[in-house]
Amino acid sequence: MKSLKILAVLFCALLFLGERVSAQEIRSGSSLAITISGVPQEETSRFNTAKFPVSNGGTVSMPFIGSVRAVGLTGDQLARSLEAAYKKAGIYTMPTFNVSDGTIIDITQLTVVVGGQVRRPGPMPYNRTLTLYDAVQTAGGATEFGSMKRVTLFRNGKSKDYDLTKGQFMTIPLEPNDTVEVPQKTILGN
């Protein structure tokens, strides 16, 4: 009888913890795994095989509908919001989204930050094949005011400038926690 009471207490504790995890709010700098069902099979691959980063602005960019507010919502709330947005846009009639427990992953330890004169500045997920040029392009590329001739790589308290208009510098590998800065062009256009 005593072991049955202990099991009951443990079960209740697990239920309570599960509710707390599912109620966890989404934060900027997270990466979400979002799945969809109730749509044609070929459409599920747009969602079910991708990770969706949450921008510094608190939004997640979704296929067909663009940016959707995510920060401050739970996974369940975001799922209901996505269902409503896709129905309202007339894209899907009966979608069912799932942002499940454990899919909100903190990626702050393995990121690279790209800033300056790029179209989408901010942190991005690091992977071992990421190069200096790839990082700038993933950030939307240089703006019309950005100079690709003096891109600065900050690593471990040191900095070095690279001319990314030259192929030899495009393949410089990045490391986690690197920062890349695309400066503004000078008056001479450099």
Image: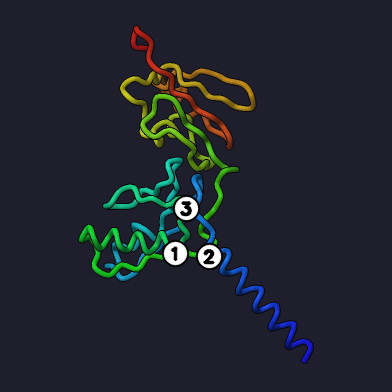
22 and 153: which is toward the camera = 22
At 26% from the left and 52% from the top, the residue drawn is: 64
Q: Residue furthest left?
A: 90
Mark with earlier residue (1, 2): 2
**Residue 93 percent coordinates (x, y):** 24, 68
| In the depicted structure, whether residue 4 falls above or below residue 96 | below
Helix, strand, or loop for circle 3?
loop
**Residue 99 percent coordinates (x, y):** 45, 62
Q: Which mark is residue 72?
A: 3
Q: Which mark is residue 76?
A: 1
Q: CA distance from mark 1 to mark 3?
A: 12 Å
Mark with earlier residue (2, 3): 2
Dividing the picture into quadrants, the one containing residue 133 is top left
| In the depicted structure, whether residue 112 falls above or below residue 68 | above
Which amino acid lies under the numbered mark 2 shown in the image of this protein? Ser
| In front: label 1 or label 3 | 3
**Residue 34 percent coordinates (x, y):** 42, 59
Disc 1: CA contacts within 10 A as few (<14), some (14-19) or many (>=20)? some
Quarter of the rendering occupied by the N terminus? bottom right
Residue with the mark numbered 2:
22
Q: Is residue 128 left or right of residue 67?
A: right
Which amino acid lies under the numbered mark 1 shown in the image of this protein? Asp
Q: Is residue 7 left or right of residue 154?
A: right
Q: Tell me whether circle 1 and circle 2 mark residues in contact (CB < 8 Å).
A: yes
Q: Residue furthest right?
A: 2
Q: Tell me whether circle 1 and circle 3 mark residues in contact (CB < 8 Å).
A: no
At 35% from the left and 60% from the top, the residue drawn is: 81
Quarter of the rendering occupied by the C terminus? top left
